[in-house]
């Protein structure tokens, strides 16, 4: 069963077709990696999937529900969360408060005007658990602005985990990370496999081949190949378009 | 962090004790002039605190906040005008409950309508559109001959809240000061509630709030209405204090003054507006005795605070303690 699928999804900016009649299917429980050269339309696709960008045509299904015209906030409530290529957290909040807010955001409306959030045991506990999961417990009281780049990436993962997503869109979670930090992130994503379905956009090929159950290659808004990582790696068209014959 | 919040609490406590004791003591010592200064200070602090909810908590720089002071003041002045001069039976009244309810209702409606439009814009556009709406009120009041147009309107009799007498300066000050305490407490609770968290989060990173599953628009609109209501209430107090109201209360430079006060005191702390309005009143008092051109040194001081004291007076205190 597909956790997420698109049919004929299209988006163009002026004369540039960023997403071209795209059919993609992400199997329930799998980690599906999406690779492609710069400008292939990967981030555009993620933004269309999460609703921050409106599609020109085509449909997006979350499980069997058509979410094509659903506003982004609602999609999150239905279990579709994302991380950003450029880390997106709340810099003035502590790490704990960042995650507690993510837990609050999916726990019904926030028209509660009197009780301090800091006294809400549910949110604080969920935040604590998510921070522990990504290995940031010791930094809970630190403001997000004072965290290192890698830590902010981990924090963002903790935030999406606190939303208890069914499906996670990860936009280059390893971008700008050093080797050690990348290894930690791979380990973290590995531990999430099976628990959450993930669509991973990533340039780090070692990470992609270590993690992916399935691999799709996007070039100029089109999927040129989809399948098991080993198959895709051997696909001559992919080698020509992206991997470069010499590197394989 | 701990130390700095203790400093702020300490400074705040001093301010509140001074405000509770000094004017009353001076009044009974025969220095009745001072209570006027303090009453004005406290009313401005209430209006400033309501703007803090927008500017400091939600990051919405409304440049039209004086409109609510005017709406609240005219909601007192117009019923009194009819009660004294005759006409408009349904509206005419000296009753304070009626006048203050009117002030709150009118402010809430105005905030709801203008907020629903303004909050679709961001940054400079938001500043301009909120200013434009408040200028609309300004020009409307100027053209209403019935209510004195730009000559203003005398409030012949203050609001009646038996057994309290608002023409007794001590009673009026007590009500204003009590209102300030209440407003500070309410805004403090709001700020730390789930509601306040949404506002604060949306101020820092709106996209992330959307991506977390919350559309901040309605929360912002509600905050906008709340701030309008509090400022409208402050306007109703202002009418009782000055007993003369005019469109000048609404002019855009008044909105600017409110913003100055917050920036001067510190826009990132709930006591910033109180500290700012105190300093504003003090500087106005001292400098205007020294020269009729007091706005010039006042402007220079403000410039220095903005350039070198990011976070206003409270911000400076907190940094000193930290270093």
Image (cartoon, rainbow, N blue to C red):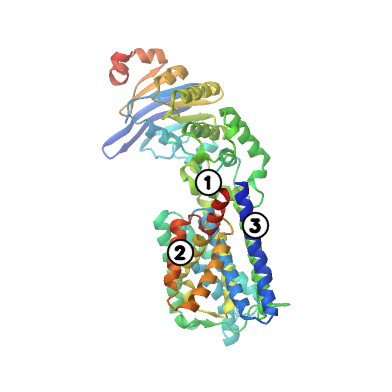
Q: Earlier in the sequence, mark 1 or mark 3?
A: 3
Check the image and report above or below for B225 versus B193: below
Q: Quadrant of residue B25?
A: bottom right
Q: Residue at x 50, y 51 (%)?
A: B217
Q: Chain of mark 1?
A: B
Between A190 and A134, the residue placed more toward the observer is: A134
Do discs 2 and 3 share a chain?
yes
Q: What's the mark number on residue B201?
A: 1
For the image shown, how many numbered marks are present on the structure? 3
Callout 2: SS: helix
Callout 1: SS: helix
Check the image and report above or below for B291 versus A100: below
Residue pointed to by mark 3: B10
In screen coordinates, is A148 left or right of B13? left
Residue pointed to by mark 2: B302
Task: Give the distance between the C-alpha atoms of the residues marked 1 and 3, in whole angstroms.
Answer: 28 Å
Between A147 and A155, the residue placed more toward the observer is: A147
Task: Give the distance between the C-alpha atoms of the residues marked 2 and 1, in whole angstroms.
Answer: 29 Å
Residue B187: percent from left, percent from top:
61, 57
Q: Residue at x 49, y 34 (%)?
A: A148
Crowd around label 3: few <14 · some 14–19 · many ≥20 (10 Å): few
Q: Earlier in the sequence, mark 2 or mark 3?
A: 3
Q: Residue furthest right?
A: B163
Crowd around label 1: few <14 · some 14–19 · many ≥20 (10 Å): many
Between B64 and B266, the residue placed more toward the observer is: B266
Task: Give the distance between the C-alpha atoms of the residues marked 2 and 3, in whole angstroms.
Answer: 24 Å
Asked whether residue B107 appears in the rendered view, the answer is no
Q: Earlier in the sequence, mark 2 or mark 1?
A: 1
Q: Quadrant of residue B271?
A: bottom right
Do discs 1 and 3 share a chain?
yes
């Amino acid at each position: 069963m597909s956790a997420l699928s698109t049919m004929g999804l299209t988006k163009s900016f002026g004369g540039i077709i960023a997403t071209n009649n795209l059919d993609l299917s992400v199997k329930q429980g799998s980690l599906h990696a999406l690779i492609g050269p710069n400008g292939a339309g990967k981030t555009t696709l993620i933004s269309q999937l999460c609703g921050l960008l409106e599609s020109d045509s085509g449909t997006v299904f979350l499980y069997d529900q058509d979410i094509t015209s659903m506003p982004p906030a609602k999609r999150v409530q239905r279990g579709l969360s994302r991380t950003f290529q450029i880390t997106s957290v709340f810099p003035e909040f502590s790490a704990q408060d960042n995650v507690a807010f993510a837990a609050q955001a999916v726990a019904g409306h926030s028209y509660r005007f009197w009780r301090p959030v800091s006294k809400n045991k549910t949110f604080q506990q969920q935040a604590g658990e998510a921070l522990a999961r990504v290995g940031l417990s010791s930094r809970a009281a630190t403001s997000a602005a004072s965290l290192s780049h890698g830590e902010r990436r981990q924090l963002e993962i903790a935030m999406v985990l606190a939303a208890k997503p069914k499906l996670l869109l990860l936009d280059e979670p390893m971008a700008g990370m050093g080797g050690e930090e990348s290894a930690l992130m791979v380990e973290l994503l590995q531990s999430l496999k099976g628990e959450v379905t993930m669509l991973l956009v990533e340039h780090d090929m070692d990470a992609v081949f270590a993690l992916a159950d399935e691999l799709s290659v996007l070039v100029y808004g089109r999927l040129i190949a989809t399948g098991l990582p080993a198959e895709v790696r051997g696909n001559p068209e992919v080698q020509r378009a992206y991997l470069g014959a010499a590197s394989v | 962090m701990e130390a700095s919040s203790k400093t702020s609490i300490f400074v705040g406590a001093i301010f509140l004790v001074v405000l509770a004791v000094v004017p009353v003591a001076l009044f009974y010592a025969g220095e009745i002039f001072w209570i006027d200064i303090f009453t004005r200070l406290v009313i401005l602090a209430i209006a400033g605190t309501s703007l803090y909810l927008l500017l400091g908590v939600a990051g919405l720089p409304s440049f039209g906040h004086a409109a609510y002071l005017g709406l609240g003041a005219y909601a007192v002045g117009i019923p009194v005008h009819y009660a004294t001069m005759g006409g408009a039976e349904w509206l005419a009244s000296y009753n304070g409950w009626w006048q203050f309810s009117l002030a709150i209702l009118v402010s809430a409606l105005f905030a709801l309508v203008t907020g629903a439009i303004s909050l679709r814009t961001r940054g400079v556009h938001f500043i301009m559109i909120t200013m434009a709406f408040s200028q609309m009120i300004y020009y409307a009041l100027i053209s209403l001959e019935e209510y004195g147009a730009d000559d203003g309107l005398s409030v012949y009799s203050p609001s009646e809240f038996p057994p309290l007498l608002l023409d007794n300066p001590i009673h009026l000050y007590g009500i204003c000061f009590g209102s300030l305490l209440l407003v500070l407490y309410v805004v403090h609770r709001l700020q730390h509630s789930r509601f306040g968290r949404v506002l604060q989060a949306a101020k820092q990173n709106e996209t992330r709030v959307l991506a977390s599953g919350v559309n901040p628009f309605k929360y912002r609109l509600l905050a906008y209405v709340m701030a309008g209501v509090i400022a409208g209430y402050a306007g109703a107090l202002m009418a009782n204090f000055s007993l003369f109201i005019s469109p000048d209360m609404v002019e855009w430079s008044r909105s600017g003054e409110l913003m100055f006060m917050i920036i001067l005191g510190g826009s990132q702390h709930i006591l910033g507006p109180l500290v700012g309005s105190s300093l504003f009143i003090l500087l106005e008092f001292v400098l205007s005795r020294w020269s009729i051109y007091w706005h010039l040194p006042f402007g220079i001081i403000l410039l220095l605070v903005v350039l070198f004291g990011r976070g206003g007076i409270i911000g400076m205190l907190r940094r000193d303690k930290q270093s």
